[in-house]
Image (cartoon, rainbow, N blue to C red):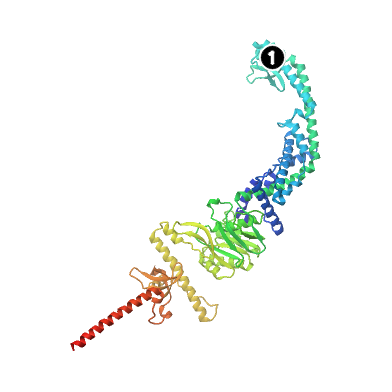
């Protein structure tokens, strides 16, 4: 499951969900979100997401509290530690947040969402909030916290003013001895800056020296008594501040159960509304969860792609088939389609909304298994093919009828014929397990296997042959082509090399057809399916000479590389082209691309009128009328000649 999450980039979805949460605790919780295997729980979680989205759409974003350091507050209070002003401010902020959230949810009750009634579960902490707001300001205990503290601080200010007045008198009288005329503070004592050579002219205690040593900072003796009185006042202030902080800490302790309960409620709401925010940001919606093994995606978008650059996906499987084989050119969007199906399924089963159209349906899976990407590993000395086989072997060992399996470039990374065989074997194994699976491939044999096998369906990604751009549109029930030679030609691949490529591709196809034909003939001759395979035709000269044989009108032929069946309507020209009618359309095809299937002599009686096949009824009627008129004209001419001959006699 973790590998599937990594391949499908579910972690990026969780990161976006985490960004939608407010509290640090919930941000971490959502990163552990996993697929839900209980249908009732899943439907409840999806309903929760839907209600959160509905409330957001109606009332705007909720005032979720960040709950900063509240966990630490609870720990400190429970062990009897005094709370510092900064922590008390966080408590007041949380109390305010619960009050605002309760009011927000009360406004949402008209929507008749269960989530809105969570607000009734919040405990009121307004008295505690007011006490902290009155007592703590600017991250320190306010003078308004108690009358005693107010009086102490007033006396401190008076004492400081008295000391400053005496210092100003000294500065005015001893100005010539001073390095500066400002009153300074060193370690909580008022001092004046005296030039070093005059330090004995000022009676007092030297408390500090400048960096250069040219100035000394002296506390005059006259301030000694005042300083002692100030120090005592400051001790009284500290004691009163600590008394106030302990009192408020005790008040917080009295609310500790309410704080814990409100925290749990706020965390649950933060999680729910994070899902609602993600839904809104993705323009997502809720979907139906069906108990049947059926997936229906209407206008589905990959949630990690920009909306204006993402072509919606229409996809369905499970009603009549358990497997889909997707084909088409490289960069045609096959892998994106595969990841979209997997990621949307994983999101839905995690209780999230997904960016799809109305009417989409998803089923539950016991696991989603993926083999997407080359999987090459230098550390494990694995080649692309080895990595694929290792991954798929593990998938086949754990997949069940309740699993969703996604396989990309099935059978790639090795000899094409062997890879094709392995690809078909893998699909057959998944089919026997009744797993829902989607696979991408280039092998034509796999397309044929899907076409002829019950429970499997082909699909293709559309491709614009004019612009050579993928359209990223999936067509179920249609077979795609790799278009490699066509794309190479459009991109300026040298013509002489292109001809070589075509001839080799054609010859391989003809060899394959000949081999199949010989094997079928041998089976019929021996009356058994277990026969020794006849000698394969590998001589290219034989193939080419066979292609250059003359064709007759009416011959049934096969046109490569599309392997389209047609009927010859015109024999070979000097330029080496044969006229072939395919699905009612007449085309001129290079003789090298045409293979004889059944000669006309075996299909039609001698003297057969091929105009019945190659010409329309209107054309045949017109020709018939012209022939009849020509016959009448000849007959009239002969009658006139006969009359002349008779008269001459």
Q: Is residue 645 left or right of residue 618?
A: left
Percent x, y of residue 514: 46, 73
Q: Is residue 250 left or right of residue 93?
A: right
Percent x, y of residue 268: 72, 48
Percent x, y of residue 554: 40, 76
Say which of 45 and 380 sits in front: 45
Instruction: Give the quarter of the image for residue 560.
Output: bottom left
Give above or below for 395 relative to 104.
below
Give above or below for 643 relative to 240.
below
- Classed neighbour count for the residue bearing mark 1: other residues with Cα under 10 Å, few (<14), some (14–19), many (≥20): some
Give above or below for 155 relative to 63.
above
Residue identified by numbered label 1: 168
Quarter of the image with the N terminus in it: bottom right
- Answer whether residue 38 is visible to the viewer in this image: no
Q: Is residue 142 left or right of residue 419?
A: right
Percent x, y of residue 192: 68, 16
């Amino acid at each position: 499951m973790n590998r599937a999450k990594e391949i499908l980039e579910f972690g990026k979805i969780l990161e976006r969900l985490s960004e939608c949460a407010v509290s640090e605790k919930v941000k971490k919780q959502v990163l552990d979100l996993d697929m839900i295997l209980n249908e009732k729980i899943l439907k409840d979680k999806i309903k929760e997401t839907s209600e959160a989205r509905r409330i957001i759409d109606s009332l705007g974003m909720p005032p979720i509290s960040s709950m900063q350091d509240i966990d630490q507050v609870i720990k400190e209070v429970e062990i009897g530690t005094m709370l510092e002003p900064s922590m008390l401010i966080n408590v007041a902020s949380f109390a305010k947040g619960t009050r605002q959230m309760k009011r927000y949810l009360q406004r949402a009750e008209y929507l008749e969402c269960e989530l809105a009634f969570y607000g009734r579960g919040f405990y009121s902490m307004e008295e505690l909030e007011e006490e902290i707001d009155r007592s703590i300001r600017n991250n320190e205990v306010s003078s308004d916290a108690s009358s005693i503290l107010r009086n102490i601080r007033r006396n401190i200010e008076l004492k400081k003013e008295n000391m400053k007045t005496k210092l100003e008198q000294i500065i005015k009288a001893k100005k010539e001895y001073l390095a500066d005329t400002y009153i300074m503070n060193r370690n909580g004592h008022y001092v004046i800056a005296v030039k070093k050579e005059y330090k004995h002219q000022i009676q007092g205690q030297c408390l500090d020296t400048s960096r250069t040593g040219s100035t000394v900072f002296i506390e005059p003796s006259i301030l000694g008594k005042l300083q002692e009185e100030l120090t005592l006042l400051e001790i009284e202030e500290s004691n009163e501040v600590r008394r106030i902080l302990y009192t408020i800490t005790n008040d917080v302790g009295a609310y500790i159960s309410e704080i814990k309960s409100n925290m749990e409620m706020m965390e649950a709401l933060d999680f729910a509304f994070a899902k609602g925010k993600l839904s809104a940001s993705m323009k997502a919606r809720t979907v139906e969860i069906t108990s049947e093994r059926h997936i229906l995606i209407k206008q589905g978008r990959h949630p990690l792609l920009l909306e204006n650059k993402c072509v919606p996906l229409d996809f369905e499987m499970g009603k009549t088939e358990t497997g889909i084989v997707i084909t088409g050119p490289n960069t045609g969007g096959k892998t994106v389609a595969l990841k979209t199906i997997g990621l949307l399924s994983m999101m839905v089963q995690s209780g999230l909304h997904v960016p799809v159209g109305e009417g989409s349906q998803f089923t539950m899976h016991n696991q989603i298994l993926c083999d997407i990407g080359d999987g090459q590993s230098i550390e494990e000395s694995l080649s692309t093919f080895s990595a694929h086989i290792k991954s798929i072997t593990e998938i086949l060992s754990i997949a069940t009828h309740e699993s969703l399996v996604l396989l990309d470039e099935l059978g790639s990374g090795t000899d094409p014929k062997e890879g094709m065989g392995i690809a078909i074997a893998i699909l057959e194994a998944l089919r026997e397990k009744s797993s829902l699976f989607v696979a991408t491939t280039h092998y034509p044999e796999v397309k044929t296997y899907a076409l002829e096998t019950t429970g499997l369906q082909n699909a293709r990604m559309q491709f614009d042959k004019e612009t050579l751009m993928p359209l990223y549109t999936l067509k179920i029930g249609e077979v795609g082509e790799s278009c490699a030679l066509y794309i190479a030609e459009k991109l300026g691949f040298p013509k002489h090399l292109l001809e070589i490529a075509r001839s080799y591709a054609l010859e391989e196809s003809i060899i394959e057809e000949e081999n199949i034909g010989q094997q079928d003939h041998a089976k019929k001759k021996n009356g058994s399916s277990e026969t020794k395979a006849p000698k394969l035709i590998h001589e290219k000269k034989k193939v080419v000479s066979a292609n250059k044989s003359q064709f007759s009108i009416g011959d049934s032929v096969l046109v490569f590389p599309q392997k389209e069946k047609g009927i010859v309507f015109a024999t070979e020209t000097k330029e080496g082209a044969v006229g072939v009618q395919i699905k009612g359309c007449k085309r001129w095809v290079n003789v090298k691309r045409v293979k004889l299937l059944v000669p006309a002599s075996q299909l039609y009686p001698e003297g057969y009128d091929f105009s019945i096949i190659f010409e329309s009824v209107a054309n045949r009627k017109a020709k018939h009328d012209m022939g009849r008129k020509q016959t009448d004209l000849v007959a009239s001419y002969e009658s006139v000649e006969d009359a002349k001959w008779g008269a001459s006699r």
